[in-house]
Image (tube, grey):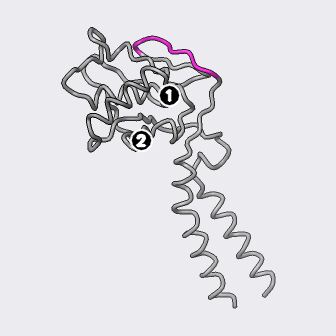
Amino acid sequence: MYKICSLSMFVLILLVALSLPECLMGQRGVATRDLWCVAKNNAADQVLQEAIDWTCGAGGANCGPIQQGGACYDSTDIQRTASWAFNDYYLKNGLTDDACYFSNTAALTSLNPSFDKCKFPSSLSVNNGSISASTGTIQMGTDTADLSSCNRAGGTWFLPLLTSFVFTWLIHWH
């Protein structure tokens, strides 16, 4: 009976380990898909404008492309304008959830927000501390990619999965 229980626990641990997403298996938090930080569609225009002002000023985002004459300039769509500023800031500041918050007016998406001649660099364009984009190369500090949301996503399925395995094990073996 002890050998069967030990074997069951070994199989359980092996199954859980093999089912972990790549970002929890030593990939050092590097995104495995393109992500962009964009303005939420329900954010108030005034709050977005305040966030753009900060991001393009003290936040240090490259807002040249959203200035008049830039490839991403659109005076009629504050969400597009904010999305460019938010995304640039996000890419320059470690790809963390905190770098894509802006008073809860921004969110990460896997849908490419690029339009016309305005090409948004994605999380996968960050390489060794710089962003390679059609608008040029933006220098950054060291590459500190961290998808904190991946850890949260793992937590949303990992605990229930583990709990169900343990519960099943207790019912069958005790």
Report the quarter where the C terminus lies.
Answer: bottom right
Q: How far apart are marks 1 and 2 (CA)?
A: 18 Å
In the rendered image, which quarter contains the N terminus?
bottom right
Q: Do the residues labelled 1 and 2 touch (CB within 8 Å)?
A: no
Image point 64% across, 41% down: which residue?
27
Look at label 1 and name its amino acid: Leu
- Identify the disc placed on residue 173: none
Would residue 91 be found to the left or right of residue 22 on screen? left
- Is-magenta flag for residue 139? yes
Q: Residue at x 50, y 28 (%)?
A: 91
**Quick one: 106 or 27, which is closer to the camera?**
106
Answer above or below: position of 69 versus 114.
above
Q: What element carries label 1?
A: helix
Residue sitting at x 27%, y 41%: 41
Quadrant of res 34: top left
Magenta residues, start to end: 134-141
Local SS, label 2 = loop
- The residue to which callout 2 is attached is 103
Q: Relative to the observer, which residue lies in front, 168 or 93? A: 93
Q: Residue at x 52, y 63 (%)?
A: 157
Residue annotated with mark 1: 91
